[in-house]
Amino acid sequence: MRNDVAVVGAGSIPEAQVTRPTLSTMGPDDGADFSDAAEMLFDRIQHPRHGEWREISRSWTFTARSST
């Protein structure tokens, strides 16, 4: 089973390095915590018919470890 499944975590959290096997991750290069995305979501919930389209764009990095 070990070679049948590959697992990748989102967010490049430091805890991924201490699991066994170590967890491969993808996360934003700038170390963002996604609070800006949560803020946009809550704003849209509070004002469903308000505002223009907004977008968050950032580059991500894949860090390969033992889980892939």
Image (cartoon, grey):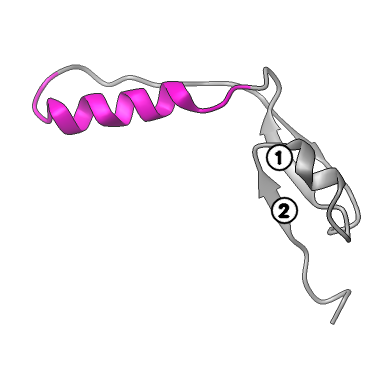
Residue 26: mark? 1
The secondary structure type at the circle numbered 2 is: strand
Task: Answer with left or right where residue 60 lies relative to residue 17.
Answer: left
Bin the neighbour count of mark 2 within 10 Å (Cα to Cα): few under 14, some 14-19, many 20 and up: some
2 inside magenta stretch? no
Sequence-earlier tag: 1 or 2: 2
Which residue occupies 81% across, 77% down?
Answer: 4
Circle 2 residue? 8
Segment colored magenta: 32-50
Which residue occupies 89% across, 49% down?
Answer: 65
Bin the neighbour count of mark 1 within 10 Å (Cα to Cα): few under 14, some 14-19, many 20 and up: some
Q: Distance between the residues labelled 1 and 2?
A: 7 Å
Residue 58: mark? none
**Label 2 amino acid?**
Val
Look at the magenta stretch and give its main secondary structure: helix
The residue most toward the bottom is: 1
Indicate the position of residue 27 as horizontal and vertical percent values: 68, 34
The secondary structure type at the circle numbered 1 is: strand
Whether tag 1 and tag 2 are in contact, CB under 8 A, the answer is yes
**Label 1 amino acid?**
Met
Which residue occupies 15% across, 28% down?
Answer: 46
**In the displayed structure, would residue 23 be above or below residue 11?**
below
Task: Answer with left or right where residue 22 lies relative to residue 28.
Answer: right
